[in-house]
Amino acid sequence: MATKTLAAWALALQFSNLTQPVTDMAVKSIYNWAGCAIGGYSLPPASVAYEALSSVLPYHSGNVSVLGSRAWMDIQTAALVNGIASHVDDYDDTHADTPIHPSRPVASALLAVTEWNFPVSGQDFLTAFVAGVEAECKLGVAVYPEHYDVGWHITSTTGSVGAAVAVGKLLGLSLEHLQHAISIAAVQVNGMHESFGTDTKPFHVGRAAQSGLLSALLAQNGYGGSLQGLEAERGWAHVVSTRENLTAEFSTLGETWELSKNTFKPFPCDRIIHAAIDGCVQIHDQAVHNRLDLGTIKNVTARTNPMVLFLTDNPEPRRKASPAQFTDEMVRNTTVVKLRANVHITADEGISEHEAFYVHIEHALGSIENPLSTQQLKDKFIEHAGSVIGKQRAEKAFRAFSQIANTSDVGSISRKFRK
C-alpha cells in the first residue's frame, strides 16, 4: 500500500495545507536551487552535457530554458542539464536526517514543466515541490543508512521518485497513473559512490530529474507500471536496501514535514567538512587578530571524522570557501601549494559528525541548529549567480525567485534570467 499511500497523499495536498514555516522553507529551497543552477552552468559538467546533447538535437528543439545560458532545449534535456548544473558545485541543500539534496531533482524537473505547460502559478509550483521533496525524503529515511552505506547515491535514487511525484501532481494525474509514474521512476534508479569526485556525480541528479519527469509524462499518456513499485517483494525498497520502513514513514506524511529539516550550505562541499572549514576560518581570524604572520606556519594537523577522508582530502587554506576558491587555478596557487605541504589529516574514530573541537564549534554554520540567515542566503545567491549573469541581474533574479509564491506564471521567471 506504500505506493498508493504516497500517491494519494500527494494528489490531495493543497497549498492551504502547508504551514507558514514549510512554505518559507520551500521558497528558500527553490531560490537556493536556482542560484546554484545559474552559477553552476559555467562549469564543464553542465556545459559539456549541453554541448554534447545539442549537437544531436534539431535546431530550436524546444522552448525550455537552461539556466545560466541562452539555450532553449526540449523539456527532458533542460531538466537534465539544469539538474547537473544545480549540483556541480556541491553548494546545494541537504536534508538533516539523510544526505539527500532534496531540491535538485524536484525543482529541475518542475521548472522544465512550467515553461512547457504554462502558466503554472507560484502556489501550485510550491505545493508540487513540497509533495516531491516529502516523497523523496520519506523514502530516503525509510532505507537510510543501509541503502547509502552499500554505495548508492541517495539523492538520485530517491530523487527520481520525488520528481515523478512533483511533476505528476502538477500535471493532475489520476491516482492510478501517479502510482504508475512512481513505479516507472523507481526502476530508473541511478547513482553510486564510485562517481563521487567526477563529472558523473552531478549527472546522477540531472538524470533523476529527467527520469522522474519522463515517468510522469509516460504515465499521463497511459504507460503502465506496477501499482506497488516501492513496497513489493521485488520492488524498489527491497532491491536497493537491506532494511526498509516505508509504511511507518509514509504514515507521517503531512504531519512531520521533512522539508522543515532542510539546510543550506555555506561552503561548496559536503556538509561533514563544514565544521572543519568553520573552525579554520575562526582560527584564521584569531591569528589575524593577534597579528600573527600566517606565512610562518610550520605545521597544521587536523583530526576529523573518517568520513571526511572518504569524501575529500584536499585542504583549502584561504579565508573564504565559496566556489571561487574551488578552482584548478586556486589549487595550483604557489602559496596554497606551500601551505598544503604542511597540512596533515588523520582520521579519528572518536570524532562524530556532531562534535566540536578546539574552537568550540557546537554547530557548524549551515547546520539545522545554526542555519544561514536570509541575508546570507541572498549573498550566496547573488555571488554565485552573479558570476554568470552579472550582479544586477542576479539581484533581480533573487527578488523574483524569492517572491515565487506570488507569481501567476513561474516559467516567466526563468525566461527573464537566462544568461
Image (tube, rainbow, N blue to C red):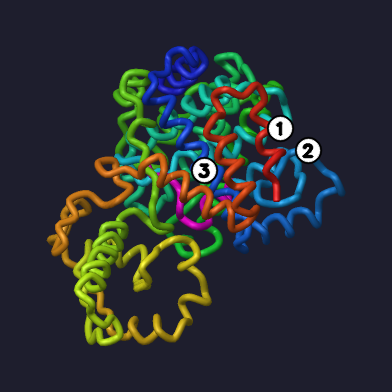
221 relative position to 161: left or right: right
Q: What residue type is labelled 3?
A: Trp
Q: Position of residue 30 (x, y in %)?
A: 51, 36
Residues under numbered marks 1 and 2 in contact, where contact means CB atoms less than 8 Å apart:
yes
249 relative position to 61: left or right: left
Q: Which amino acid does label 1 sit on?
A: Glu
Determine whether the residue tagged by mark 1 lies in a helix, strand or loop.
Answer: helix
In front: 232, or 389? 389
Let me know if residue 111 is in the magenta part. no
In this view of the protein, can residue 73 be seen by the observer?
yes
Q: How crowded is mark 2: few (under 14 residues within 10 Å), some or many (20 or more)?
A: some
Q: Residues within 10 Å of mark 1 (few under 14, many from 20)?
A: many
Q: What stretch is highlighted in magenta?
A: 83-94
165 relative position to 256: left or right: right
- Say which residue label 3 marks: 33
Image quarter of the N terminus: top left
Q: Which amino acid does label 2 sit on?
A: Asn
- Say which residue label 1 marks: 115
- Say which residue label 2 marks: 63
Determine whether the residue tagged by mark 3 lies in a helix, strand or loop.
Answer: helix
In front: 388, or 346? 388
